[in-house]
Amino acid sequence: MLKRFFVMIVVMGCAAVRVYAQNADHGRGWVGEQQVNVRATPGTRGAIVGQLAPGTELILHGREDTAGNGLWVYMTPAAGGITGWVLSDFLLFPVTLDLNALPVVAGGGAAATAATAVTPVPAASVSVPEGGLAGTTRSPVNLRSGPGTNYSILRRLPGGTTVIIVGRNAASSWLSVRVDGQAGWLSARFVSFGGGLNALPVSDGTNAASAPAAAGMAGVVPAISGTARQIYLNGQNMGNRRAVFSKVGDSITASSLFLYPIGLGGAQLGAYSALQPVIDFYLTTTARTSNSFANDSLAARSGWTSFDLLDPARGEQVGCNGQAPLLCEYTTVRPALALIMIGTNDAMFGVSGDQFRANLQTIVQTTISMGIIPVLSTIPDNTLAPDRVGEYNGIISGVAAAYDIPLWNYWAALQGLPGRGLSGDGVHPSSGVFESGVFSADALIYGYNMRNLTALLVLDAVWRGALY
């Protein structure tokens, strides 16, 4: 029972205040009598990135300031774990704490400083084709593959980015643009421009960069930042191969059910036919033993932990003399990106959160230093170490945010599936009567089918957002 001097505080409104850096300690709170969700952004539409048990002590960094949204606080568990947003209604605070006095965290948890006006980049600095318009983004905005929020995010554009407007939808609410040679769509309300839109050609998005393949996958498939693009460009200068990716992990990654069916011609895309181009792209090049989907990775084996990926002794077991498996895979295959999911065995073997974080940081640093984009995946639930999954996914999410690299939230994709997408052993993803490359509604109730679909969505996002 929590002590009486903590009370539930419900705040009806909050005035705008200066914006402070987000990770300072501005007070403490505790989770109340029921488990709460941690979200990536403030609001019930934000992606769930973890959960906190009753009584968990929290370090409070700040709050959001959106009217009618409830009051959400930005926090980190005092014992370590995921930093994110929690609705204050489900928390307990000291009676001396005034939630209205907490600093506002800008950008839904993005690194915040005192707010300043955006100075647009002069439109005259770009060459505008005949019939087009020059524009400037008014604030940070998602560049999407089609005219609507149901289309996949290609990348995040900062405020003040100069774009070339070459078309619009019928309502002129979405603009077809080019930026740094990349095509995409922006919501018109986030773009400043001179001149009228009526002369621009109208498109319904049928020939957009990608159909809305990622619809319904908000919070699972990441937005691709400029950091990923820069890592890719560095890797190209090092001789990495654009049409190759590596698979890094444990038995869930080494399994013949993961991506092998895609590489062997077993994909049945159904409503996700927009993913065929990215499949075709990776089928063209042999990674080592096969194309990237069906390649036998040197950095994925059953029972491996984060330490095993970095252990030269494990490298000896897969034929890499003197090299750790991760380094051996990268030097042999020379990929442009790596799909990394590790941590299930660490959790079950009792590896501390601090040690796991240190190992994961080394994995990420090694990957980036070799010009390879690391895509970190959250781990699925398991029944052998159920209390560690949230902690580990918090660490994974935190490392991805710290390095500004893509986070593939596989855990979130499994939450609505029968048994949370787990097989009878309570550890590995489930599979059924369908091949794991089948993406019909009946097949997507299984964990491996969902893993393959979300892997393709992530590959597609990185391909379009960074590998152009």
Image (cartoon, helix red, strand yellow):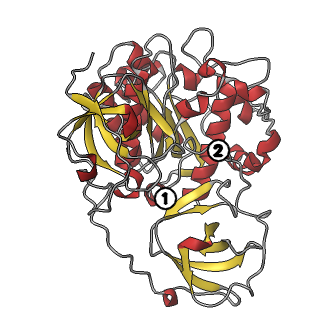
Image quadrant containing the C terminus: bottom right
Q: Earlier in the sequence, mark 1 or mark 2?
A: 1
* Picture residue at 32% right of the left edge, 18% below the top: 351
Please state which amino acid type lies under the numbered disc 1: Arg
Label 1 sits on a secondary structure element that is helix
Identify the residue shown where x is 62% and y is 9%: 424
Name the secondary structure under disc 2: helix
Q: Mark 2 — residue?
A: 457
179, 440: nearer the viewer: 440
| Vertical position of residue 197 compared to residue 382: above or below | below
Res 294 visible: no
The residue located at (46%, 10%) in the rendering is 384
Q: Is residue 160 above or below residue 380?
A: below
Observer-nearest of 253 and 40:
40
On residue 229, which mark appears?
1
321 vs 352, left or right, is right
The CA span between labels 1 and 2 is 17 Å
Crowding around mark 2 (Cα neighbors within 10 Å: few <14, some 14 to 19, many 20+) is many
Q: Amino acid at mark 2?
A: Leu
Question: Can residue 412 be seen?
Answer: yes
Q: Local crowd at mark 1 within 10 Å, few (<14), some, or many (≥20)?
A: many
Q: Quadrant of the N terminus?
A: top left
Residue 457 drawn at (x, y percent): 64, 44
Residue located at (49% from left, 27% from top): 379
Quick check: 397 above or below 106? Answer: above
Instruction: Pinpoint residue 147: horizontal percent, then vertical percent.
Output: 70, 64
